[in-house]
Structure formats: structure tokens, C-alpha cells
Amino acid sequence: MTPLLALSGLTKAYPGVVANDDVSLSIAPGEVHALLGENGAGKSTLVKMIYGLVKPDQGGMQMNGAPFAPPEPRAARASGVGMVFQHFSLFDALSVAENIALGMENAPGMRTLSQRIREVSDTYGLPLSPDRIVGDLSAGERQRVEIIRCLLQEPKLLIMDEPTSVLTPQEVEILFETLRKLSAEGTAILYISHKLEEIRALCDAATILRLGKVVGTCIPRETTARDMAEMMVGKVLSTPTRSGAALGEPVLKLEGLSRPSPSAFGMPLREVTVTLRKGEVLGIGGVAGNGQDELLSALSGEMLSPPGMITFKGQDIGTLTPNARRRLGVLAAPEERLGHAAAPDMSLTENAMLTGADREGLVRGGFLDWPAARAFAVKIIEAFDVRTPGPGNAARALSGGNLQKFVIGREVMQRPEVLVVNQPTWGVDASAAAAIRQALLDLAEGGASVIVISQDLDELMEISDRFAALNEGRLSDPRPTDGLTVEQIGLMMGGAHGMEVAHV
């Protein structure tokens, strides 16, 4: 069979780094092909060349046996290539149909488009009303908007980048049913994900990249997730471990925490009540947009709370600023890396100074101690294996995974008594994710209390003592993770609690 897409010897270099080095692979019609690799392996550059965002330096591509070299995404789409990006490109204030129209070359009238949206959503099991405002949609529904926008253009090849990172287990199964239906109809799918068990369940073949080169191929269903991960990183992976020591006294208490969202399309917190103990890792799951950002803001001090709602070691801290809470030992690392956790144009040294000034003693006599700040940044880089030329490098110059390692390392190394992290391993490869999880477990082992907010349920089950779910700004009663099933977790994330969950 003639491959739908064939890549031959693709090479792309940037100053100081070869992103892709003589990469060749082929994808057959109807094939679900995984593209695997750790952060910085070259996956993003490769799909950008296929989608017309980047021009290769050497090598070539063929589509159905004919030369294929799209100068821009519009040309790639015209040739039958669709792409669903990891970060959604949607306007919250517009309707589903309006957002889809903006992404089409020659959009039909709104009435015709709405009808086509309904037809595609029914055909592929992606329930979605064209009239709904995107700002009111869940993360899973927003992804459906992106997928339907692609499907309306009848792609021959659909590229998906980390498509399940914001979905519940039930939504993942709906997505997989859709992708299997597309595959059966002859649409090829190039699937990028760090979730290797999903790769095993869905994909027919896999190509593994490391440092820009193809280092192997495999049939995922015949290969263990661990073997694939070790092919990606080129070494034996260690599994995060913990001694399981008894938890200590209560440290942080939330009592009926209720706060409006600062965003027009955010989710208010509603009567959130929970107690965190010394040495505990509390995992909080939930579909994106159910109050995760608001909860982190309330705990970090970016959003203040009335007295009585948040106490740390018996002291009311709801009215304290982020720096005041940091001085006490309550630290946080938000989900958004660039612009929130780190200032994009500032160096790593400057970003280390931003949150570490007080706890690391980086201010002396009213002056910033830059040599000390640089030494702190170097310590983070070395301890968390951050791939960067040095501490003078700008935050925006790092890959997403390496910046994530720096941000988490910066907070962990300040020896917090309470650390709240949102999506600590989002977009991070298997090796780096294992290292970050171990660092969080080591922190708890040393007596710190950790709240991990994540959409990665495997991660939460691996490192958490207890699990709770956020749904529409409400937090379920925490339950021991030992013995929890995926079905129970999915119901908790969907807002079902109590006996209904217990009897699943």
C-alpha cells in the first residue's frame, strides 16, 4: 500500500541545536501512528513541518506519492492535513459556530454551518450545540470544537498533540471511539502523547525520537509502557517510591472557602472544606475549568479570602499576600508556566529571584544579591536537570518541559511547609515526570504537606495519600487513593459523590 504520508531524511536546525536529524517515517491510510519522545526530542518541530509552520532544511515529504511541501498551514489543510493543538485557539465570548467559522477558509452561512456541525457531531459521537458560548464549555467540550472544526474540512491526516491532558476517563473513551471511527473510514492519525498506556490502547504503530533522531519503532500493543518510556529516554527509569510513614498533625485547613472567580468565564469556589496533614500528599482531580486556578489563587494569596476560611497552623492567612504566605512557608506553583509561574523575557536568575528573594535570603541591606540569586538558579538547574545553556538564559528560550522542571524545582528547593502545585508534570516527558513526582514525595517525606492539582489521574493515584475532585467549584470529600477505581474517580470528577460513587 502506498503510504498516505512519507517523510524522508527531514532535518531542521536552529542556532545551537539540531531539532530534527534525518527523520524518516511513513503513515498508511487509516493508521493511528504515535510519535513519542521526551521533551526536546523534536516532535513539535516535526509536526510543524508537516503542517506548514516550519520549512525543513533538508529532506522531503510525499502525500499519496506526490511531493508535499506546504509553505503555510492553509496549504497543508488544502492537502488534507488537520491539526488539533495542545493549547486551544478559541474565543470565549463567541459561540461554537462562530469559532469554527473563524478557522475555516471558506465558511458557509451560519445556518448551513450550524447544521453541518450538528451532523458531524452526531456522526462521530461528539455531542455539541453550535449555539453555545465557548466560555461556558468544559475543557472536553472545547476540544470537541477543535476536532469538529478539523473534521468539517474532511482531513486525510489528523495530527493530535496531547489530546487527553484535560479530559475525564469517560471523555477519553468518547474521544477514542471517535478516533477509531475515523481510522476505520481511512483517516490517518498522528498521535502525540506522554500517556503511554493510552498509546498502547489506541495506536497501531509508534516512532520514537530522541535528541532529534529516530531511535526506534514499535507496535504499542505488543510493547510495555515502561519499555517505550525507556526507549524514549535511553536509560532505565526509576519508579517514584515512598515509605508510607504515618501522617502528622493538621497543618492547613479550608473551612467553607467560597470566592467569586476574577475571570468572567472562571468558576467560583463553593464551600470548599478540607484539612491537610503534615507529610500528606493530597491529590485534587477534575476537568479543567472547574475551579482549579481559583483554588490555587486562593491558597497562594493572589486572591484574598475573608477571615476564617484558610488557616495555617492555627493562624488565619486568608488576608495575607503571596509574599507574606511565602515567609510563613506556604508556597505555590501555578499551571501557566510563561507569564504566571515565570516572566518570559527575564533570565532564569531573575525568575529565581522573583519567588526566592525572602526564603533564600537574596536581599541584603535593601539590595538584591545577584550572585546569590545566580547561585540559587544554578542549584535548581543542576538538581532538576534543566536543559539550558545557563542561568542567564531567558525563560521563554526553554522548552515547556524544561521550564516546568525549573519552576517546580524553584519552589521545592525553598523548603516549603505547604506546597500547592497545579499540573506539575503537564507536557513533561516520562523521565522528567518521574523526577518531579519523586521530588514531591521526598518533600512530603521530609514533613512538608503537598497539594497536587492535576488532570493526570495516573499521577494522582501514584503519589497521593488521598484524592478529592473539583466539580463546578465544589470539592468532594477526600478519599484514600488505595482501592479507588477509575470509574469511581470519573464519577467524582463529574460531580457524583457519596453512595453513588461507593457502589460503582
Image: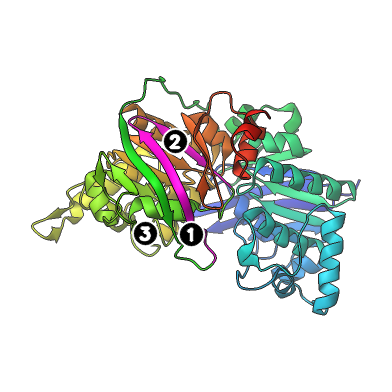
Residue 303 badge: 3
Q: In which quarter of the image is the N terminus?
A: top right
The secondary structure making up most of the magenta span is strand
Q: Provide residue 263's location: percent of width, then percent of height.
A: 48, 66
The earlier-in-sequence mark between 2 and 3 is: 2
**Residue density around tag 3, few if under 14, some if 14–19, many if 20 or more, within 10 Å:** many
Residue 89 in percent (x, y) is at: 62, 65
Q: Is residue 250 above or below residue 91?
A: above
Mark 3 and mark 1 residues within 8 Å of each other at the beta carbon: no
Q: How many marks?
A: 3
How much space separates mark 2 and mark 3, taking CA atoms? Answer: 21 Å
Say if residue 334 shows up in the picture. no
Q: Residue furthest left?
A: 365
* Lower position in the chain sequence, tag 3 or tag 1: 1
| Magenta-colored span | 265-286
Density class for disc 2 (Cα within 10 Å; few <14, some 14-19, many ≥20) is: many
Asked which secondary structure carries label 3, the reply is loop
- The answer to whether residue 269 is left or right of residue 45 is left
Q: Callout 1 environment at 10 Å: few (<14), some (14 to 19), or many (20+)? A: few
Q: Residue at x 69, y 65 (%)?
A: 52
**What number is the disc on residue 15?**
1
Image: 476 above or below 231: below
Q: Disc 2 residue type? A: Leu
**Residue behind mark 2:** 282
User: Residue 170: where, in percent of width, then height?
Assistant: 70, 42
- Image height of 251 relative to 99, above or below: above
